Amino acid sequence: MIRYLRNSEIDSKKWDRCIQKSVNGNPYALSWYLDIIHGEWEALVDGDYERVMPLTGNKRYGIHYLFQPYFAQQLGVFSTDKLNPEIVHDFLQAIPSHYRYIDINLNSYNKVEGDYEIIYNSNYLLDLIHDYEDIMQNYSKNTKRNLKKSLLNGLVIMKGLKPEDIIRLFRENRGKTLKNWGDEQYHRLGRLMYTAIHKGKGVVYGVYDEHNQLCAGAFFVKSNSRLIFLFSGINETGRHVAAMTYLIDDVIEEFTPSHLVLDFEGSNDPGLARFYRGFGAKETHYPRIKINRMRFPVRQMYSVYEMLKKK
């Protein structure tokens, strides 16, 4: 029987045990991770935590809704036992009725059947079980060319940088173009990075140019047999000298051979997708699902979610 639990009713130890043992577990769904990205998360729990689904809700204009929080690409239903479309459907139907609008990402193991609006997003994965030399042979011509370029520019990579160094690099460059990112998101990201590092689940890499200036950096989370490329920053110098290619190649070399999978976290953007494929990563998909339970005329409003998601 699927039960709806408020945050205070969730047994975090049983929850994390389920996520760790799940065939489709990922770090986004661990209790400490959810506590940071959405402190008042709720849950659907089947049995004695054999199957679970986190609920990340909010309320705006008097409307309760579910949304996908920052820094969690995939959530959805997690199971220590079998998982099929019927089970996923049962969980979606068990979402409490007070949630009038739902726009969330399930995970790649959640196969969905039913009268739902479904969009399939792209993700890219690279299996690190093979030797580095074998993986490198599958790099694209462009990636190999960029790697040679980076090696000629006197780049130096370092581990253990402070999270705020990478956040600042991002904020002063690509961050300037993001309208929905503010102090709240950057503060939450900093907490997430520091907590993951403290738990031995996170690592920060930085690339320095020939003038000893930080020009690129990345943060990875390692959990549930995955090494997730969660966040990165790069400036114009870093782009010019192919610093991110240099960084990712170094990480691949460090973690091969192993039973980890390098998870690039997307993307639907053609340029980023081409960059990830350049390392031999394979495309996978996960469903974004929308459910509109609102009554007419609100149901007919254009882009309801755009109105609601401004948390």
Image: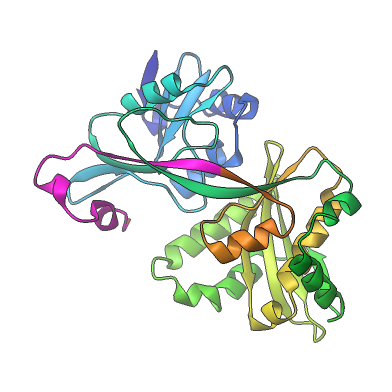
Please tell me whether residue 294 belongs to the stretch shown in magenta.
Answer: yes
Residues 272 and 210: in front is 272
Q: Measured along the vertical axis of the image, is residue 280 above or below residue 118?
A: below
Q: Measured along the vertical axis of the image, is residue 68 above or below residue 187?
A: above
Q: Position of residue 183 (x, y in %)?
A: 44, 67
Residues 297 and 209: in front is 297
Residue that appears at 55% across and 63% down: 270
Could you tell whether 32 is left or right of 212 in the image? left
**Coloration of the structure image:** rainbow
Residue found at the very far bottom of the displayed protein: 211
- The answer, for residue 106, to whether it is visible in the render is yes
Q: Position of residue 259 (x, y in %)?
A: 79, 37
Could you tell whether 259 is left or right of 263 in the image? right
Q: Quadrant of residue 1?
A: top left
Residue that appears at 54% across and 58% down: 189
Q: Measured along the vertical axis of the image, is residue 116 above or below residue 170?
A: above
Q: Position of residue 213 (x, y in %)?
A: 74, 82
Total number of numbered discs in the rendering? 0
Residues 149 and 198: in front is 149
Residue that appears at 37% across and 19% down: 3
- Location of the C terminus by quadrant is bottom left
- The answer, for residue 72, to whether it is visible in the render is no
Residue that appears at 43% across and 66% down: 181
The segment highlighted magenta reads 285-310
Residues 277 and 191: in front is 277
Q: Position of residue 98 (x, y in %)?
A: 22, 33
Residue found at the very far left of the displayed protein: 297
Q: Measured along the vertical axis of the image, is residue 45 above or below residue 285?
A: above
Please tell me whether residue 126 belongs to the stretch shown in magenta.
Answer: no
